[in-house]
């Protein structure tokens, strides 16, 4: 009788192979060249919670943000309004640990599987909610259906 095979990657360190690639261990940055960057050098990113599968947020990455995310195992986005890298949780403490990075079939959208850290339950939205997708269209009106878990005035400096 043979032992059950483990789920691929189930016990592997977070993003070890991607981090090795990003760090230049044995493989060039060609994986970054496979991403279809827009005219501004950005790619849209969706962050999905690992356990619940909730879609937490939408953001953007440039090449450096994606490379940093792969190397660090934590979400680094590109803030279009600030024109710089945005290390998720740098002010709020609501860091996203990245478990997997996926590229869609057209190579133009990324999906991060994350654990939202810093508050229980996790807060991903700057409004103090678990997810940025807290409004539902009902009878022609956008209605907030998720509670504010923490007052944003107490989160940001």
Image (spheres, rainbow, N blue to C red):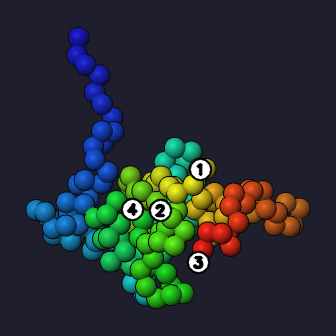
The disc label shown at residue 74, or none: 4
Evaluate whether residue 106 shows in this view. no
Residue 157: mark? 3
Q: Are marks 3 and 1 in contact (CB under 8 Å)?
A: no
- Looking at marks 4 and 3 on the same chain, the residue that comes earlier in the sequence is marked by 4
Nearer the viewer's eye, disc 2 or disc 3? 3
Q: Where is residue 62 in the image (x, y as percent from the top left)?
A: 39, 79
Marks 4,2: beta carbons within 8 A: yes
Alpha carbon of mark 4 to alpha carbon of mark 2: how far? 7 Å
Quadrant assignment for the C terminus: bottom right
Q: Going from the N terminus, do you reach mark 4 or mark 2 first?
A: 4
Q: Distance between the residues labelled 4 and 1?
A: 18 Å
| Disc 2/disc 3 C-alpha distance (Å) | 16 Å
Direction from residue 114 to residue 20 in the image, left or right: left
Q: Position of residue 49 (x, y in %)?
A: 52, 52
Q: Residue 81 carries which label?
A: none
Residue annotated with mark 2: 95
* Residue bearing mark 1: 120
Q: Position of residue 8 (x, y in %)?
A: 30, 39
């Amino acid at each position: 009788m043979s032992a059950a095979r483990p789920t691929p990657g189930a016990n592997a360190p977070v993003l070890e192979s991607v981090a090795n690639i990003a760090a230049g261990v044995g493989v060039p940055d060609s994986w970054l060249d496979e991403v279809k960057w827009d005219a501004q050098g950005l790619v849209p990113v969706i962050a999905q919670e690992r356990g619940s599968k909730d879609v937490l947020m939408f953001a953007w990455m440039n090449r450096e943000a994606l490379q940093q995310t792969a190397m660090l195992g934590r979400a680094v986005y590109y803030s279009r309004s600030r024109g710089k890298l945005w290390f998720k949780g740098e002010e709020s403490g609501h860091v996203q640990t990245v478990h997997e990075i996926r590229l869609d079939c057209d190579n133009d959208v990324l999906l991060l599987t994350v654990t939202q850290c810093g508050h229980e339950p996790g807060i991903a939205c700057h409004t103090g909610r678990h997810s940025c997708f807290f409004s539902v269209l009902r009878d022609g009106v956008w209605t907030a259906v998720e509670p504010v878990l923490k007052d944003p005035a107490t989160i940001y400096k």
